[in-house]
Image (spheres, rainbow, N blue to C red):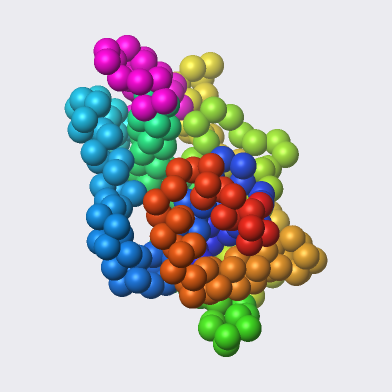
């Protein structure tokens, strides 16, 4: 099962996430027993355990926990940006911590802060959209939708799925909480994710709702909506082929114990090379 949020990475439309991370996640989702068995044999911690160890050993636990807690209370772009700046400054000022480790901590901490802020503000964004459009959004994250998109050469099913932010007026609603500004043009990774939902639900169109909460310049709460028609050409040419290739590659990889071992043991560069060998870059 490939999640809709992972599709832009697989389709090479999201430069901010690594394909090897998505590959591991989908592999673990597909056969967690296989992954756990290999990691135990190799005495390897999981990625979550590795990150937890890095945080504890560097002494960054309190800094990151405080920042995530503050993000839950943040009520504007300015506040969340202040939280990320404070987090970055605190980690950069740590003594006896290597610069490479600091970068890992900052990337992880900022990601956690922004994800938490987005999650906390999703319902607020939906409510503001309903007030502005004088409509009702239904089905927010209530149901997991999925679609069978193909079979591997070994007849293993390839599925894609996810939970939508809601539906209104016959449209699939996808909410994006912006932390700086409205995006113009819209990022292809956001369009790709929405197109994936439209393909799964076989809906004719969707609406990408950008939500921005400002305190400066009298901004307040702002919402910008873009209606996007289902694009079968984009789905068939720019998205689906990558998903099928990914599914076939993962299926082949799961039959190769040596490659599995190398993937889990080696660093990011070598994992990247394995992805390249499967034509996923």
At a point 40% along the width and 31% down the height, the residue shown is 104
Q: Position of residue 10 (x, y in %)?
A: 60, 57
Question: Main structural element of the magenta stretch: helix, strand or loop?
Answer: helix
| Picture quadrant of residue 35 | bottom left
At a point 58% along the width and 85% down the height, the residue shown is 154
- Up the image or down, 96 lies above or below 169; here it is above
Question: 104 and 269: which one is in front?
Answer: 269
Q: Position of residue 186 (x, y in %)?
A: 68, 43
| Picture quadrant of residue 103 | top left
At a point 53% along the width and 57% down the height, the residue shown is 6
Determine whether, in the image, residue 89 is placed left or right of residue 243: left
Residue 236 covered by magenta stretch: no
Report the label total.
0
Boundaries of the magenta span: 73-101
At a point 60% along the width and 80% down the height, the residue shown is 152
Q: Residue at the front extreme?
A: 258
Q: Position of residue 255 (x, y in %)?
A: 49, 75
Question: 180 and 171: which one is in front?
Answer: 180
| Picture quadrant of residue 114 | top left
- Observer able to see residue 79: no
Q: Position of residue 189 (x, y in %)?
A: 63, 49
Determine whether, in the image, residue 38 is placed left or right of residue 2: left
- Observer able to see residue 178: yes
């Amino acid at each position: 099962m490939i999640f809709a949020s992972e599709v832009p990475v697989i389709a090479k439309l999201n430069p901010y996430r690594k394909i090897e991370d998505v590959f591991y996640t989908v592999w673990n989702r597909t056969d967690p027993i296989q992954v756990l068995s290999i990691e135990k044999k190799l005495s390897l911690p999981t990625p979550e355990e590795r990150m937890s160890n890095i945080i504890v050993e560097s002494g960054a636990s309190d800094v990151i926990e405080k920042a995530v807690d503050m993000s839950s209370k943040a009520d504007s772009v300015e506040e969340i940006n202040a939280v990320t700046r404070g987090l970055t400054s605190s980690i950069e000022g740590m003594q006896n911590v290597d610069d490479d480790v600091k970068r890992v901590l900052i990337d992880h901490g900022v990601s956690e802060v922004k994800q938490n802020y987005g999650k906390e503000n999703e319902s607020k964004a939906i409510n503001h959209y309903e007030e502005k459009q004088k409509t009702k959004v239904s089905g927010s994250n209530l149901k997991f939708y999925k679609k069978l998109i193909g079979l591997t050469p070994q007849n293993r099913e390839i599925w894609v799925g996810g939970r939508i932010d809601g539906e209104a007026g016959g449209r699939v609603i996808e909410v994006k909480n912006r932390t700086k500004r409205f995006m113009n043009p819209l990022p292809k990774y956001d369009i790709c994710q929405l197109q994936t939902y439209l393909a799964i639900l076989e809906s004719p169109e969707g609406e990408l709702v950008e939500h921005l909460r400002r305190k400066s310049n009298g901004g307040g709460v702002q919402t910008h909506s873009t209606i996007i028609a289902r694009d079968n050409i984009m789905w068939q040419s720019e998205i689906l082929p990558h998903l099928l290739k990914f599914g076939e590659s993962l299926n082949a990889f799961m039959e190769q114990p040596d490659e599995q071992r190398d993937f889990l043991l080696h660093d990011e560069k070598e994992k990247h090379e394995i992805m390249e060998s499967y034509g996923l870059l």
